[in-house]
Amino acid sequence: MKTLYLLRHAKSSWDNPNFSDFQRPLNERGEKAAPLMGKTMRDSEFLPQTIISSPAERAKQTAFLVKKAADLDAEIRFDQRIYGAATSEILEIASELDDGFASALLVGHNPTFENAVRVLTGRFETMPTASLAVIDLEISDWSEIAPGSGRLREFLRPKQL
């Protein structure tokens, strides 16, 4: 069995009109929510062995803040495909993971992550910023990931913590 964690980036700032969507950083609320989710992950023993993030600024900041707050040893890698990805691309990225990893955290964007949860588990959950889906996959190799191969174990929203 493998575990896939899908984390939507924390709340971003729209304050600077000169920033492109890709460049938008976290706002104050996002800078508080990301470490809260990291601490919750640590306390819940949701400890991914690798982290793959969108390279968009808000996702990168979220990944670093979560990693620090959760005290994870996992390396953070960036995959351009996550930014603007279709759900099929998220599954493709997961399918390419090293089978030595029992768990992985992907940090990215909506509506793709909401759709990925639905496609993998058959459940629809709204995914506000900094939400985390914990999906248990009934697979032994990441290459086996497919629609319907997962079960939603937990769904965490910052406002509920």
Image: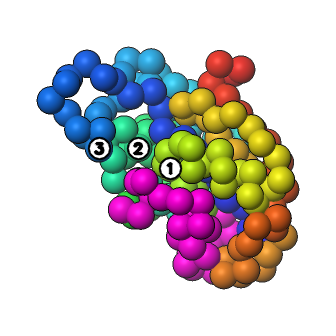
Which residue type carries mark 1? Val
Contact between labelled residues 1 and 2, with CB atoms less than 8 Å apart: yes
Which residue type carries mark 3? Phe
| Mark number, residue 46 | none
Contact between labelled residues 3 and 1, with CB atoms less than 8 Å apart: no
Segment tinted magenta in the rendering: 80-103
Q: Earlier in the sequence, mark 2 or mark 3?
A: 3
Q: Quadrant of the C terminus?
A: top right
SS for callout 3: helix
Residue under the point 55% across and 33% down = 130
For marks 1 and 3, give the CA distance. 14 Å
Spot occupied by residue 92 in the image (x, y as percentages of width and height): 57, 73
- Crowding near pointer 1: few (<14 within 10 Å), some, many (20+)? many
Spot occupied by residue 26 in the image (x, y as percentages of width and height): 36, 29
Q: Classify 82 as above or below 17.
A: below
SS for callout 2: helix
Q: Earlier in the sequence, mark 2 or mark 1?
A: 2
Spot occupied by residue 10 in the image (x, y as percentages of width and height): 48, 32
SS for callout 1: strand
Q: Classify 133 as above or below 104.
A: above
- Taking the magenta stretch, the answer to whether it contains residue 97 is yes
Q: Which residue is mark 2?
A: 59
State how many labels appear.
3
| Mark number, residue 107 | 1
